[in-house]
Image (spheres, grey):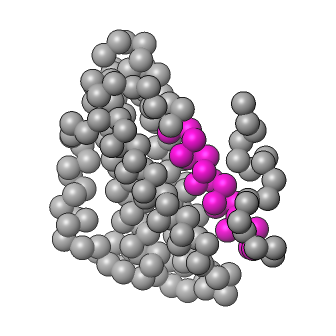
Amino acid sequence: MQPEPWLRGPIVGLEPGFDPVLAHLLRASQQIREDVEAACGHLTREQVWCRPEMLNPVGFHLKHLAGSSLRLLTYLEGGTLSWQQLTAIPLEKAGEEDTATLLASVNAAFDRYDACIRALAPARFAELREVGRDRIPVTAISLAIHITEHGHRHVGQIVSAAAIARVTGA
C-alpha cells in the first residue's frame, strides 16, 4: 500500500520550482480520486443509488462532486455558468448511472482541475473571480483551494455512505 499522495515526494512531471501551494492542490486532487475509487470501485449500481439510513446515495455525492467541481472550475477560469450547468444541478439527486460512469465523471472533472492548477501562475493568485448569481468576488487561489476542500467533504460522505451501502447489502 502506497503512502498518501502528500507523502510521496515530488510530483512526476512538475518542473523544478513549481509553486508548492499548487503542488499540494495537485496532491489533494489525487487523494480525492484515490479515496473515491477505494470506497466505490466495487459498489454495484444498486448500492450506489440506495439510500442507506436515508442518507443521500453515493451516486448523488459522486455526481455532485464532479458537477460542483466543474462549476467552480468555470468560475476559476473566469466564466459564468451555462444554462446546461444550471439545469444539471437538480439532476444530481437522482440517476441510474453505473459506478464506472460515475467514477469516470469524477476523474474527468479532476483532470480538468489538474490542468487548470498546472496553468495557474502564482502571479494570478490574487486575481478576482465572480461566483454565483450574486457574482461574489473571490480570488483565484481561494477558488482553487475551495474545490479540493469541497471535494474532501464529499469524499467523507461518500466513504461513509458506501460503507453503509455495502453492509446493508443494498
Q: Residue at x 51, y 85 (%)?
A: 128
Q: Main secondary structure of the magenta part?
A: helix
Residue 116 place in picture, x, y as percent: 53, 72
- Which quarter of the figure is the C terminus placed in? top left
Q: Is residue 31 above or below residue 29?
A: above
Q: Nearer the viewer, residue 20 or 136?
A: 20
Q: Is the residue 4 above or below the residue 80 in the image?
A: above
Is residue 51 in view from this perspective?
A: no
Residue at 79% across, 47% down: 7
Say if the magenta span includes residue 9.
no
| Magenta residue check for 26 | yes
Quarter assignment of residue 68: bottom left
Residue 17 image offset from top left, x and y in percent: 81, 75
Q: In the visual, does 105 lie left or right of 125?
A: left
Q: Is residue 42 left or right of residue 82?
A: right
Quarter of the rendering occupied by the N terminus: top right
Reply above or below: 158 against 90. above
Q: Position of residue 90 (x, y in %)?
A: 20, 52
Picture coordinates of residue 117, whole percent (x, y): 58, 70
The answer to whether 154 is drawn above or below residue 162 in the figure is below
> What residue is shown at x 68% (from left), y 81% (from top)?
122
Residue at 60% x, 78% y: name it: 120
* Residue 166 visible: yes
Q: Is residue 75 left or right of residue 51?
A: right
What segment carries the magenta color?
A: 18-36
